Amino acid sequence: MLVKSFIALAACTRFARAVPYPHDSTSRVLPRAANSTTCPGYTATNVDVTDSGLTADLTLAGTACNAYSEDLQELKLVVEHQTDDRLHVKIFDAGLNMFQVQEDVLPRPANGKAASSGAAVRFDITAQPFGFKVIRNSNNETIFDTTGTPLIFEKQYVRLRTNLPKDPNIYGLGEHSDSFRFHTKGYRRSLLNAESINIPNNANLYGSHPVYFDHRGDKGTHGVFMLNSSPMNIDIDQNDAGSQYLEYNAIGGIVDLYFLAGPGPADVSKQYADVVGYSAMYPYWALGFHQCKYGYWDVNMVAEVVANYSTAGIPLEVMWTDIDYMDARQDFTLDPERFPLTKMQELVSTLHSRDQRYVLILDPGVHAFEEVAAYKSGHDLDVFLKAADGTDILGVQWAGAVAWPDWFHPNTQKWWTDEVLSFFDADSGVNIDGIWVDMNEASSFCHDTQTCNSRQKAIDDGIPPKPAFAPRPNTGRPIPGFPSSFQPDSSTKRDLEARQAMGQMKGFADREWFNPAYTVSNHVGGLSDQTIPFNTSNYDGTRQYDTHNLHGHMMALTTQKSMSARRPDVRPFVLTRSTWAGTGRKATHWFGDNASDWEHYRTSIRQMLSFVSMHQMPLVGSDVCGFNGNTNENLCARWAMLGAFQPFYRNHAELSTIQQEFYQWASVAVAAKKAIDTRYKLLDYIYTALYYQTTTGAPIINPLFFLYPEDANTFGIQEQWFYGDALLISPVTTDFSDTVTYYLPNDVFYNYWTLEKVQGAGTNVTETNLTTSDIPVHIRGGSILPMRMNSANTTKALRQEDFSILVAPGTDGSARGRLYLDEGEKIQQSDVSEVEFSFQNGKFTASGSFAYKGAVGESITVAKVLVIGQDKAGATGTFDAATGSVEVQGPWKLDGGFEFQL
Ligand SMILES: *[C@@H]1O[C@H](CO)[C@@H](O)[C@H](O)[C@H]1NC(C)=O
Ligand SMILES: *[C@@H]1O[C@H](CO)[C@@H](O)[C@H](O)[C@H]1NC(C)=O
Ligand SMILES: *[C@@H]1O[C@H](CO)[C@@H](O)[C@H](O)[C@H]1NC(C)=O
Ligand SMILES: *[C@@H]1O[C@H](CO)[C@@H](O)[C@H](O)[C@H]1NC(C)=O
Ligand SMILES: *[C@@H]1O[C@H](CO)[C@@H](O)[C@H](O)[C@H]1NC(C)=O
Ligand SMILES: *[C@@H]1O[C@H](CO)[C@@H](O)[C@H](O)[C@H]1NC(C)=O
Ligand SMILES: *[C@@H]1O[C@H](CO)[C@@H](O)[C@H](O)[C@H]1NC(C)=O
Ligand SMILES: CC(=O)N[C@H]1CO[C@H](CO)[C@@H](O)[C@@H]1O
């Protein structure tokens, strides 16, 4: 009974919170930001130029305009050429009151103190009125220019505008569902993390990545990263005279800019990784196919799905369970009837014995009742965010009234890790392989944070009340030798004020927390609606007002450490809904609760392009076949193909929808088998690309302009992509269509399915009559693809298959490729191979390092090399006139290099 009512509640809650879906308008009138003509700006004095940068004082240049709060009189400017390609420009208040993102959140890159004389860009300062330009030295292209619009730097409002050339190509600034390349008139990106049912356009979504790429064709590409987590609107618009600009409007924080000089798009990706961190490396199995659904009723149903995949002959690598497994939706609990421990353990051991994996979900909110073990242990360690009176701040999530972990509290990591260690213990708990953290924007079912009574709201939602802890009195006296529960409560208001006063750059303590005069557009309502109140203090004295956008990031980082504590040797797999700049160094992401429709099928492509190539989060994807609403056979089949060429490949659906496992429809099963078969044959190719993204920042997914930066036809393409750097994917994107028109750059390509040579002409090509198991894929000439000869039903079995190397010569007849081999899961890889393949003047060479010898049963043998695009037989191999290919038989073991002349 109880369980039933929760299910009903869950369903209606998700739908009750659905928002309308506005169309991606090309031109809107933005709410006006500060009137620049009335603000005085600043004057730079004491400009001290050094060999690798400069410092200056900035003083308010006239009467304060106090546009939205008090103008700050004295600022500091620091400019550093940190490397030849990276310029750091920081403007902050001389009083050190404005919030600055904590070092733990984003460890700052070292300042390499490059000489300004050798730098790719230069910094030109105008003292009065203060403004600056960043100029590319190689061609004198101005890449950033604040002159003409005064800087506004107030307690609750910071504005900085840069002039841009006409019709700029600007990308990034995730998370959004808008066009990949931004509209340039009346376009706003709001960075304010929020639960976002059906990922609306022109809205703030789950994560914030304040970095944009500005691509100027043959004049180069650069990136600009604003290291500020406070909510902000970024407006891309034209003034009345038609001049183009981009403008930051933040409600707090400082101006902390990193200019990344490129000059190529992938150079900017790398330079961004140098600032926010390189992606974590993921286990080989994470690239397998994953299945989930909210509403798998019990452990039997979960097992049946796994069994049905096997029966259907569709390889399933990873099984997931949503909040269904929990006892009354509470973290670190199992529903004793539907998901009893012993059966859960048998489920996991059965999966493991078949070389399959299991992932479970956690939410940040902990059910705030005395009898809840995780709440009690957290309370003992004092890890929850506090109200002014020392009681826990509450919100409402799936479990009911919940307390929020303070991810900045020094005890939180230990508490969370202890819970993870005990609940997911390999022997006495559920021995999972990965964790999925959800709802961590943080999303609360209470709408108005200031007035909502969370306990009453939970009761109204049908969740019965239970005994709660009384507020803990604070005597202010420590009791030596006793546990922390006997010690003074360090989170009372008085102590908080003391902590706040102690530190620097933690944000002003006296601000309008809920309705500042300048606010950030939020599709769920007011600034602080449906989340933790913005006046809540964190342990370190900072406020949710400034750190709200970091909640998911911090939860992901904390969980990743906890997973490392469970299995110290292996690469943790953590999937998070909410993200911030640099989350990718520890965790990965899916695009949230989309809809089962064609629009979101298309949206998944542009979201992937931004996240992988611009936010350094390589292992991303969307819910295949769609999450909300019922999917259909045609869409699900096409999505099965689409998802196979995206990095993270998981089928997932909402509670109230029909089941959408690939085995549910015959045509979908056919498409999925072909898709997974293809994906798995290419798994080492993409694992190699993933490895190189984690070490060099070069993206695993390439937008077309990354590889054809001077071809203006590619700049706006958002329904095609390169999987790795060698495979051009051009799916059908029109509803229920069998036709696709796609762009082929002026280059040599080969049809992946037929091996036929196709000369791209820088024009569109139309293919018709594509069944639901057809997807156009082209190999880019000049590439060498390491593939497995055969697919398999698990990635472990796949590793037993021999390699087959496909050589696709480019216009000049040559080709290159590489293969990274390691054991697949361990953090410390003692022996790895980095093989370089090349083909030139008919000579094929495999060289590099060959330390990886393969586990028992694994193959590191190349069975054959296939050279395509040939019109005649060579001295070696067998010529096939039908496909224009020469096949050279091995075997060659990859414990050393080999070569042959065709
Ligand atoms: C901005 O302020 C100036 C000076 O007060 C005024 O003339 C102008 O009309 C204002 N512009 C807007 C758009 O409010
Ligand atoms: C860029 O401008 C500087 C100063 O005006 C000039 O000395 C230099 O030659 C220019 N460089 C190029 C590549 O045009
Ligand atoms: C598994 O397959 C059987 C036989 O087709 C079907 O009756 C059952 O509903 C399926 N179970 C699940 C959970 O999909
Ligand atoms: C994979 O195939 C093998 C051989 O047919 C079989 O023994 C095994 O159970 C299959 N594994 C899965 C996960 O389906
Ligand atoms: C935050 O604001 C609410 C509503 O205005 C108030 O009740 C609460 O005491 C404040 N919390 C703190 C920690 O100041
Ligand atoms: C290709 O087709 C798209 C969509 O119809 C169009 O926007 C684009 O301009 C075309 N590209 C070329 C090079 O013709
Ligand atoms: C589409 O394919 C079908 C089946 O292969 C074939 O009969 C038909 O002629 C094709 N139509 C076109 C327009 O190519
Ligand atoms: C973008 C979109 O298609 N949104 C739809 C998502 O699903 C809900 C309900 O399933 C629809 O109401 C939306 O229109």
Image (spheres, helix red, strand yellow):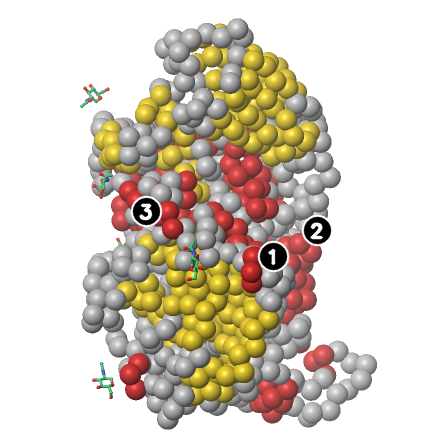
Disc nearer the start of the sequence (2/1): 1
Res. 730 visible in picture = yes
Q: Which mark is on residue 560? A: 1
Instruction: Give amino acid for label 1.
Output: Gln
Question: Looking at the image, which is closer to me, 820 or 799?
Answer: 820
**Residue 577 image point, x, y percent:** 46, 58
Q: Residue at x 46, y 50 (%)?
A: 263
Q: Please say if 106 is above or below 605.
A: below
Q: Which mark is on residue 715? A: 3
- Horizontal side, residue 426 vs residue 339: left or right: right
Assess whether mark 1 and mark 3 are in contact (beta carbons under 8 angstroms).
Answer: no
Crowd rating for badge 3 (residues with CA inside 10 Å; few <14, some 14–19, many 20+): many
**Residue 398 image point, x, y percent:** 45, 65
| Gap between marks 3 and 1 measured at Cα | 36 Å
Quadrant of the image occupied by residue 753: top left
Quadrant of the image occupied by residue 499: bottom right
- Please state which of the two labelled residues, at mark 3 or mark 1, is closer to the viewer: 3
**Residue 187 image point, x, y percent:** 28, 64
The CB of the residue at mark 3 lies under 8 Å from ligand 6: no
At numbered mark 2, what does the secondary structure look like: helix, strand or loop? Answer: loop
Disc nearer the start of the sequence (2/3): 2
